[in-house]
Amino acid sequence: MLITLIYGSATNYQMHQDELAEILETARRNNAKVGITGMLLYKNMNFIQVLEGEAEAVEQLYEKIKLDERHHSVYTILKREIKAREFGEWKMSFVDLDETPPVDLPGYSDFLQQSLSDQMDTEQASRVYVFLKLFRDSMR
């Protein structure tokens, strides 16, 4: 069974480009081994990530992420079964929105400036999913 899982988290400190590059390289290598695809966004010491793949692989990775000391306040935004991948061609896409001014990106939205609650309702979770899909489509 394929699932998509979107989560948000905060970091304990402002990450530098070299550290973000290392995280991305490791994620791409490890995710390719277990068939996980997705997208990772970073802004103001916060991550939002989409993980897609077989349920067991995604859930194991998510548990590992929740234990990573670089994160805190890890929360699930959306988790559901999918018929097909939305980010299938992306081993793990990444955008550091601190380095790339969002207003310079096609499809800019001020969504990341808005507060995200760990008690998100279905409507908010759907908005996150739509936002990520629009962002993905504008980056091609």
Image: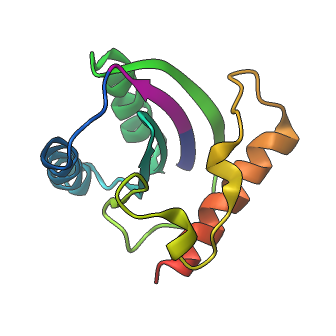
Q: Main secondary structure of the magenta part?
A: strand
Q: Which residues are magenta?
A: 7-12
Q: Is 79 in front, or is 1?
A: 79
State left or right for residue 38 relative to residue 126: left
Q: Position of residue 65 (x, y in %)?
A: 34, 27
Quarter residue 59 falls in:
top left
- In this figure, what is the number of numbered marks? 0
Vertical placement of 89 versus 54: above or below? below
Q: Residue at x 77, y 52 (%)?
A: 127
Residue at image point 65% right, 35% down: 77
- For residue 55, above or below residue 70: below
- Residue 38 in the magenta stretch? The answer is no
Percent from the top left, x then y, of residue 126?
78, 50
* Residue at 36% across, 68% down: 90
Q: Could you tell me if residue 23 is visible in this image?
A: yes
Q: Decide which of 61, 48 is in the foreground and name it.
A: 48
On the image, the x and y values in percent for residue 83 come to 63, 62
53 sits to left or right of 80: left
